[in-house]
Amino acid sequence: MSDVTAPVPEDDLLAAELALGVLAGAERAAALQRAAREASFASAVAAWEERFVPWAAEIAEVSAPPSVWERIVAALPADKQTSGWWQSLAFWRGLSLATGALAAACIGALIYLGNAPQQAPLTAGIDGDGRRHFVATIDTRSSSIAVVPAAYSADATREPELWLIPADGKPRPLGMLRADRAVTIKIPSELAALTVGNAVLAVSLEPPGGSPTGSPTGPVIATGKLTNL
Amino acid sequence: MDLDANRTLIVAALARIPAGDRAALQTVYRLTSAKLFGVCLRILGERSEAEDVLQEVYVTVWRKAADFDAERASPLTWLIAIARNRSIDRLRASKHSRHMAPIEAADDVADSGTMADVALENAQDYARLHGCLDGLEAKERSALRGAFFDGNTYEDLATRMNVPLGTMKSWIRRAMMKLKSCLQQ
């Protein structure tokens, strides 16, 4: 390669400086404004970004904590979709973080409206460490419990297991939960009568497949009391 | 993660965002956030700030997805540019650079590339850029590295390499023009 390079217009140099990131203060602000206003300058900047970007291959990937995604969802403008939004895990994660009780009520209301049950559903926000980990709704008519993950973030080795703790204080296993989607669990018939208002739901971290003993063996990370809607 | 193989998925998801599709944004986030977080963290050097900026990056992606033109740019170039720009804005706002250790031109033996993610666009582009960087003088290459990876300004680089500001400007400008002409060949 020779040191003799073709003459380059001043604009292209400025585009390169902006793309590389060496400008500061008023110079950077002015260059950013030009990129926003002038298509030809913007494409010169984009061309420089394309030239430099293979370098980013040297930067290692780092997983961001789940709280970042929750904050992104919370920062988005109000939802403008007309259908399907209630199925979105992201939506519930964001909403339940912001307004957990409302989210629980909405899930309950959807089940309520959908099934026209005889009895009002029960709900619980399952919280621990100042965060809402899951939101649970019990449809007493079909004797099933739907649990939606909220701020819960997956543990590397253990899985979340859901427990019912009725008035006698003894935990009964209900089933395994998921960090990435809602699960619906059929409540065993012998527990149905115990699944009432003021009973407590708890989540513990257990080996894959669940506690081998029938009682929680790992830490209980979150609890919540069932209440009638 | 093979980001290049996911390019089609990212482009398709970006195209769905302007209609208000949050699941599409989540797809983009899942496929790209580890890379972009790495970029923010590299420039800002501090986790909580990098998390703040990463949040801003994806909110920007949500707002500006309609501006992305797959015919003209690679989605990763577009996303990485947003991440770098946001990180640099944050760095400039805090009024002090995090990476100010003196740079010796000889430091740049490490340059020949610890490639964390070969698959990022493709290995060929990386090899081509490196071939051209190898054609620069060591001091020019070190200055470019400081700007790209550490988010340094001309002034930061002049301080770190202990040369007058005007000298630094001419090194970088000359280096960039040599790079452009080499990459065109």
Image (cartoon, helix red, strand yellow):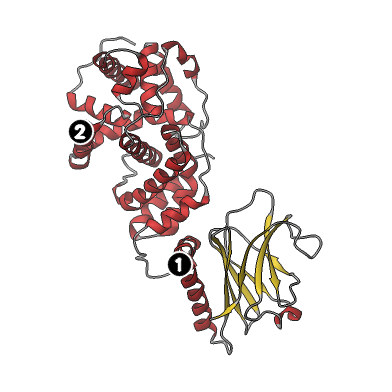
Q: Which residue is mark 2?
A: A26
Q: Looking at the image, can residue B55 be seen?
A: yes
The crowd level at tag 2 (other Cα within 10 Å; few <14, some 14-19, many 20+) is few
In the image: residue B81, left or right of residue B51: left
Q: Looking at the image, can residue B6 be seen?
A: no
Q: Which one is nearer the viewer's eye here, B132 or A19?
A: A19
Q: Quadrant of the N terminus of chain A?
A: top left
Q: Residue B174: x percent and y percent? A: 27, 16
Q: Which mark is residue A99?
A: 1
| Chain letter behind tag 2 | A
In the image: residue B36, left or right of residue B176: right
The three-letter code of the residue at mark 1 reads Thr
Q: Residue B183: x percent and y percent? A: 34, 22
Q: Which one is nearer the viewer's eye here, B100 or A178?
A: B100
Name the quadrant containing residue B152. Answer: top left
Q: Residue B115: x percent and y percent? A: 51, 27
Label 2: state its secondary structure.
helix
Q: Residue at x 29, y 22 (%)?
A: B155
In the image: residue A51, left or right of residue B127: left
User: Same chain for marks 1 and 2?
Assistant: yes
Q: Residue at x 58, y 54 (%)?
A: A153
Q: Residue at x 75, y 62 (%)?
A: A216
Of pointers 1 and 2, the one earlier in the residue sequence:
2
Q: Which one is nearer the viewer's eye here, B103 or B129?
A: B103
Above or below, comparing residue A43 to residue B161 in the picture: below
